[in-house]
Amino acid sequence: MANRSPLITELEAPRALRRFGSGWYAGLFALLLAIAGLGLVLALRFPGELATPELVPVYQSALFRPAVHLIVLASFALAMVSLWLGRYRAMGLAALALALVASLIGTGAPGAGPAGRGGLFFGLDFFILNLALSGLMLAPLERLWPHIREQRLFRPEWQVDLAYFLISSMLVQVVAFVTFGPSRLVMAHSAGLAGLRAAVADLPFVVQVLAIMLCTDVLQYWLHRAFHRVPLLWRFHAIHHSARAMDWLAGSRLHFLEIAVVRGLTTLPMFTLGFVPEAVQAYVAVVYLHSALIHANMGGERDWWGHFIATPRYHHWHHASDAEAVDRNFAIHFPLIDKLFGTFHLPAGRWPTGYGIAEPVPPGWWRQFVHPWRR
């Protein structure tokens, strides 16, 4: 504990020491805004390397640069408030330094043109957008309706899960390339499905989104069971189940090989059956938020909810260390699939007593990445 950085120590401060007026909240939001501001400035300055091509047109909006200026200025102001209140100086100084770097780089970079689609890019802006949509939506809800009230925002192992979140977002191009591989192969050898694709494309938008959810969920159910039952696959999936605390960030703890296999196969119906791009994009947004939601430290749900749609309590039983929960609740969206195949488990009014697995998994992103290959 002696070599812990002051910044980490302040972020993980006990709830009793971070009450309103102590400077903790000002320091936290100053740090978050400074990180977002610096990331957006870098993506604006180097769009070909750091920007997601689909988001580059946003940079050309007349409102984008003023918005980035406001983010940086707000981080400056909150950092000064945190330093003035005095207790959490490491957070305030870190935010001030990042905001200063963002200002020195400047938002006066040349207008961002189309990012180099033929080369490698890192989705820094996608990470910021993903973190903002998921974190700023679900973290407050976890504070308002927590399942485990004593669990802190910066609970044990949060740094590991944030690293997974960052790396999967930054490598969005690599993930997409791996994901689309099987779909491209099927599309190249399935010209006879043109009639079916035309019929699917004519379905109402909402029906298409629900159909994508159902098709991908059926495929993912069996893949998920395979990752639990096949020892070789379990080595990789065990990384996901090694989390001993559940919150919106814990769902990002996935080994890259599992991401490649699961996304590559479950997206087959999404990209090969003729669904319109708008329905696919809507599903992608839904699955990102829903995946974070079902891992969230949120209570307050009714018993019957988890019988129709995957909820936090339903999915928490899948991560439970309780013996009664082993190999249960494999569905991602629709618990009906578990009911059909005898793997549904949702005892009325009860939550798991603990999370995680008995077998040892090393700490740290890199050690967990190489861990399955060494066994």
Image: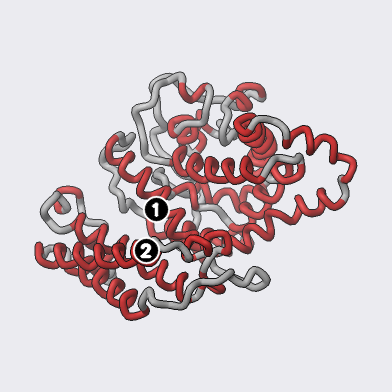
Residue found at the far front of this picture: 62
Q: For mark 1, what is the residue?
A: 132
As displayed, is residue 56 above or below residue 225? below
Q: Where is residue 98 in the image (x, y as percent from the top left)?
A: 30, 72
Q: Position of residue 344 (x, y in %)?
A: 57, 25
Which SS class for mark 1?
helix
Quadrant placement of the N terminus: bottom left
Residue found at the far bottom of this picture: 104
Q: How crowded is mark 2: few (under 14 residues within 10 Å), some or many (20 or more)?
A: many
* Front in this rendered view, residue 20 or 270: 270
Along the horizontal axis of the image, is 308 left or right of 155?
Answer: right
When asked about the image quadrant of residue 225, the answer is: top right
Q: Where is residue 323 in the image (x, y as percent from the top left)?
A: 50, 32
Tags 1 and 2 touching, CB below 8 Å? yes
Along the horizontal axis of the image, is 319 left or right of 284?
Answer: left
The residue depicted at 50 percent of the width and 75 percent of the height is 46
Q: For mark 2, what is the residue?
A: 36
The residue depicted at 42 percent of the width and 54 percent of the height is 131
The residue depicted at 68 percent of the width and 34 percent of the height is 215
Q: Can residue 116 be seen in this view?
A: yes
